[in-house]
Amino acid sequence: MIWKRETTLDALNAMGAENMVGLLDIRFEALGDDYLEATMPVDSRTHQPFGLLHGGASVVLAETLGSVAGYLCTQGEQKVVGVEVNANHLRSVRSGRVRGKCQALHLGGRHQVWQINIVDEQGRLCCTSRLTTAVV
């Protein structure tokens, strides 16, 4: 297991209640030994003007997953901040919920690198993202 902090899905979901995570209805759904998953709706909150999932919304889901996962891999007063995020948008989505799965590529003392893949309800890859965080 990679996590250094104890938590529950309920606690993770409560963290997002009063910020962008809650506003977009991002829900943490699974916490495994080495991964974290969350879902996000594809609706008027996350659409771009042409009725498709906004690429920026996908990045919000990716960065949310990577930042929370990164925090769970720290101890004491340590926190993480995003340093760089990139995303490749591979398939459009018009409705439903997308699911992001976050896994560590590198867990260093000063930096972490996270891979986040986002799939549609049929399991098709829609976006692949990488987030680098700094441990502060």
Image (cartoon, helix red, strand yellow):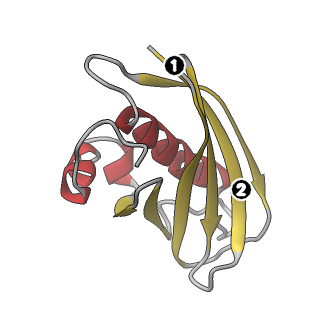
The type of residue carrying mark 1 is: Gly
Which residue is depicted at the point 50% across and 66% down? 44
Work out whether residue 34 or residue 119 is closer to the camera in this orientation and state it: 34
Label 2 sits on a secondary structure element that is: strand
In the displayed structure, 97 sits above or below 104; it is below
x and y percentages locating residue 82 in the rendered image? 55, 27
Query: For the C terminus, which image quadrant?
Result: top left
Residue 35 in the image: state x and y as whole percent: 48, 55
Residue 91 found in image quarter:
bottom right
Residue 25 visible at all: no
Residue placed under numbered mark 2 in the picture = 128
Residue 134's disc number: none
Residue 109 image label: 1
> Residue shown at 62%/86% (left/top)?
122
Above or below, 101 relative to 67: below
Seen in the image, is 78 located left or right of residue 98? left
Q: Nearer the viewer, mark 1 or mark 2?
A: 1
Depth check, front residue: 95 or 51? 95
Measured as percent of width and height from the top left, residue 56 is found at 63, 48
Q: Is residue 11 left or right of residue 44?
A: left
Between residue 123 and residue 50, name the one nearer to us: 123
